[in-house]
Every structure is written in C-alpha cells, then in structure tokens.
Amino acid sequence: MVISGLATGLLYSLLGVALSLVYRTGGILNLAMGPLAFVAALVSVVEVPGTAANSLWALAAAAVLGGVLSGLTYLLLVRQVEANGGAFRASVATLGAGLIASAVIAWIWGSQVHAAPNLDLGSGLTIGGTFISPTDVATGAVVGILFVALASALKFTRLGLHIRAIGQGPLTSSMLGLPVTRIRTLIWGVAGMLAASAAFISAGRSGLVAGNENNLLVAALAGLVVGGFDSLLGVALGGILLGLIENILAYYVASWLQAVSLLIVVVVVLMSRPNGLIGRHPGNLSEASLPRRSRLVRIEDLPRPQLSTSIFGMFIVVGFVLWVARAGSFSTVAGVEAAIPFAIMILGMYIVIGLSGQLVLGQGAFAAGGAYAAGILAAHSSLGLEVSLPLGFAVGAFLGIMIGTPCSRLGTVYLSVVTLVFGSAVSELALHLGVTGGANGLALPPPRMFGYTLTSPTGVISLELVIFLVLAGLVALLRRSFFGLDLIVGRDASRAAQTSGARVVWNRIAAFSLAAGVTGIGGVLYAETVGLISPELFDFSFSLNILAAQVVGGMDSILGSIVGGGFLGGVPQATSGLKELPNIIFGGALILVLMLAPSGLTSLVGSVAERVRQVLHTQYSTRAGGRGGRMRKPSNLSRASQAK
C-alpha cells in the first residue's frame, strides 16, 4: 500500500514539476497539459508500430510527441494570446486547447480502454520483507532519473541560469539579450515531455480511456499547490504526500475517495501555509508594462459601449427569446430553455471573476449544490420553485462560504486550483452518496410554482427570463454600489484598497458566496429543464464549458452572460448528432475570441453599435444644422479652413 502510494505520488510529482516549469517562466497555468499528454501517450501506444513489445521505445515516442505538441501550443497559441491579453487570458486559452484535445481523444479512440505496456526494468526488490513490484521499481527509477537530470540542468548549466532569470523578470531578460521566446518554447517542450512520460507510466497501471485525461492533471495541480509553485522540491514532496494519503484512505476508508482526499489535504495545508509547504512568496522583479506590437486585430481602441447601448441590446435579446418561445422549432426552444439557466450561472461567475478578479474553475460544484437541493426537495415534498429557488441560492452560498473563507487570502492561481479540486470532490460525492441517487441520479417532476405546473415551453422560458432579468438588474445595481466599487478597486489595486481602509478579504468572501448562490439558482433551473440530475451533468468539463462561455461572451459584461448562455445552450442543440463536436466548437471559439477580441464578443458588438450610433448622431446633427437648426460652435480648425 505504501509502495503503491509512493509510485502514484511520483507520477503526480512528475506532472506537477512540468506544470511548475511552465508557470515559473511565464505565470501561465497550462490547463491543456493533461489532455495533450494523453494524446501523446495514446498515439505512442496505438498508432506507433513496435511499441507494444518495447515499453522504453513507447515511452520515448510518447515523450517526444508530447514535447512537440506542447511547444507548438506555446508558439501558435499561448504566445499570441499573451501578447494581447497577458498571462491570465493565456491560461484560459490553454483551456480551449484542452477542450479540443479531449474531443479529439473521444472522437478518434472512443471509449475503449487501451492498455499501455508496463515499464519493467528487471525483477522486483524485497526490502525489509516488503516486496516491490518491477513496475514500481521502474517507475521510481525513471522518475528519479528525470528529476536528477532536470535539477542538475537548472542549477549547473547556463541554460538553467537563463531560465531562472526569465522566471524572475522576462522583460529585463529580453532587454539583456536573452532569447526569451526560444527559451520559453524549449521549456514548454521539456514540460510536455515530462507530462507525456507521466501519462504513459500511469497508463501502464490503469489504461488509457477517454474521459480520464484530466484526472492526473487535477491531482498534479493539487500536489503543486500543496508543495508550492516556486519550489521543485516542494512540488515533488507535495505529489508524494498526496499519493500516500490517497492510497491510505482508499485502503482503510473507501476506494473512491480520490478527489475528496485531495481537497482535504489542500485545504488543511493552505490554511496554515498559504504558499505551500516549501513555497515562498514570489520575488519577481518589478517591471514596467511596455506596449507590445501585435499582428492580430485589436478591438480595444474602439469606443466603449454606453449604458443605453447595453439596455438596447438587452431588449433585443428579450424580444428574440419571447419570439422563439412562441414560433421556434423544438430544437430551438430546447436550446433557449437550457441557455437561460446557463446565462444565470455565468452571471453569478461575473460577480467573482469580472468584479473581484478571482479565477474560479469549480462552477459545476455550486450549480450541482442547487440542483441536488431541488431534487432532494422534490423527492420528499410537493413544494415547487417558490421554495427550491431560495434553497438553491442558500446551498450555493453556503458552499461558497465554506470554500471561500479558507481561500480568501490565496493568490488567483491557488484559488483556481482549490476550486477545481472542490468541483471534482463534489462530483465524486454525488456519484457515491445514497441521498443523491448515485449514478442513477434523481428524477424531477415538471416545474411548478405556487401550485401551478408549467407544462408548456413558453411558460418555462418566460419564468426563466423573468428570473434572469431580476438577477441581472440586481447584479447591475451591485456593480454600481459602494460594495461593487470596492470589489473593482480590490481587483485592480488590492494593496491600495487595503491602505484606504477597504476590507478586501471580506469583500472577496462576500462576492464568492453571492456568486455561488446565483450559480445555485442557475443549477436549480437547469435541473428543472433537464428533468434528471446525475453526476455527469456537473463534471469537470461542465465547469470548463461555463468558463469558456463566459470568456466568449465577455468576462467584464452582464450582457456577456446572455451571449455566453446562448452559445452554451445553442451549440449542443445544433450539433446533436455529433457528441464530440460541441467541445471542439467551444475550444475553437474560445481561442478565436481571445486572439481577436480579448474582452469578448459583447465588447466587439457593443463597440460596433456605439460606432454606428455616433455616425448616425453626427449625420443627424449635420442635417439639422443645414435646415436652419441649432448649429454647433465651429472649432478652431474649421475657422482656419474658412480663412484659407
């Protein structure tokens, strides 16, 4: 049990070191590393000839392919998005690459389990009466060799010195003549090789099957947080610790407690050591932000939309929804019926991501809390939405307080990882607890409110639309209140806000709980729309799709929640015959939006609408002046032209 836990922990550490290398040299959290490593392992096992009989040859092929995929991801995607939107949006862009890679895995290789050859460097060992299997010996030997080689290269070579310099200050390093782009590409390639090696060795123990490509990534991210992002030794210790605890709990308590055990360890460690066991506060150089020239189209210089433009856009959306509810086809009505709950979830995440600047990757957990609360209430009573909606808000807000309070002082990347692990833990509990119905889920009756059953899609859509408009109005008032201004100031300049007396930590906790509560309301409506609640509805990909839709619509706009919700509800209906195509569309749209309009589609549409409004206003003013209307005072330039 202990030896198996050590071997599992070494794999977590290997992938965690790969993630740490990428993060230390650019501040980017590579969320595509797990799926890309899975692709490399699958190609080496299934497609490359001769790998079934030679495990070392298969490992080498997977490592090379993983390095190539990771390096190309940086050159073709991450570098371009980072030039436009910084490290935050570059991290989100890797999410799009991960969604596409996951869809490709399911499309090409299906749900069949592909067994990778076990590493076997000889016979096993017996130490102190404990037998160590050949696979565990080979795992320890390979991971140990990779760790020693990497640590030696970083500490004793000129390249390692350059890598450390870029991690401290990339702009300063570039001004000193270091080839920052080439070195970062090399780092991404090396990280991809390490990640593919970890995926291949793990596949020899449990096989390769579509849907499991992110399990190793979640565990590696948890080990990264436990050990500390800036310490390779801490990352290794964190992964080993998680592997040991996971195997001990699986042996003595329950075999399915993987994500729950990760969450417990992460929360306990971060409450006492906010930067990890060995991690320290990053000591990066304070660098000026210089403008970067980009060959991509930028929308930022166009005029920003005014409030009247947003209200006009809201009226257009409401009219379209009501028209669809009456005259649309069945698939269109179903898409709109699912889009409004998604819009409410994105609206909730707008509070925590758009206003307070906290990256959350566990939206599915809060939506699942509201949905299961409604399902359990419907199973034991005849009460309707008049009770389940407030209950969903309360359950979501409680989950937000429970996870937001211990994480309120953490950095953005630590909080994102904690919420990611929390979402996986909630899905795991929903799958195995009896009160949630387990894998069969909970069936819900048709939605009803105050004794009236809503049987027609028009009634359901109208009710959802009213709830969304009320919540959107409240969120708009929140944004313009003193509390909303405190959130924005704390997002943009937290130290200045604390100096001026703002309670930044408590504001973040309140924003987190409010966002989780609104997301819980969206979960209730989504469950009523679907009619069956199951753990698969709120899995890892659900949270990532919510974040992708929010970025596509616009993270800084309330109107963006409508665009994102329509995108998330409409694409599956339009591609109902192809199960993998929605994730490809989600990932591709996310990448295109981040490259062409980093602020989302609403900024593009709003800017164009504002430009049209200004042009029409100018033409109207000119015509009114020509008819003897009120003329504007001529400028100095026009006077000079008339004088000439």
Image (cartoon, grey):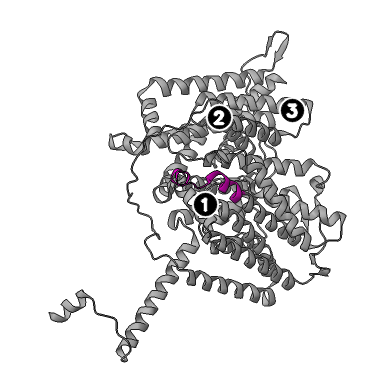
For the record, the magenta segment spans 495-512
Q: Which residue is mark 1?
A: 487
What residue is rendered at 57% in x and 51% in y?
352
Q: Which residue is mark 3?
A: 249
CA–CA distance between discs 2 and 1? 26 Å
Query: Horizontal and vertical percent for residue 172?
Result: 32, 36
Q: Which residue is mark 2?
A: 276
Mark 2 vs 3, N-terminal side: 3
Q: Nearer the viewer, residue 359 or 9?
A: 359
What residue is rendered at 65% in x and 47% in y?
400
Of the 4 image quadrants, the one containing the N terminus is top right
Q: Main secondary structure of the magenta part?
A: helix
- Answer with left or right where residue 618 lies relative to residue 634: right
Location of residue 143 by image quarter: top right
**Vertically, is 629 above or below 246?**
below
- Answer with left or right where residue 36 lies relative to residue 84: right
Q: What amino acid is found at the position of numbered circle 2 in the picture? A: Gly
SS for callout 2 = loop
What residue is rendered at 50% in x and 44% in y?
91
- Answer with left or right where residue 637 lies relative to residue 6: left
Is 541 colored magenta in this rendering? no
Q: What amino acid is found at the position of numbered circle 3 in the picture? A: Leu
- Which marked residue is nearer to the observer: mark 1 or mark 3? 1
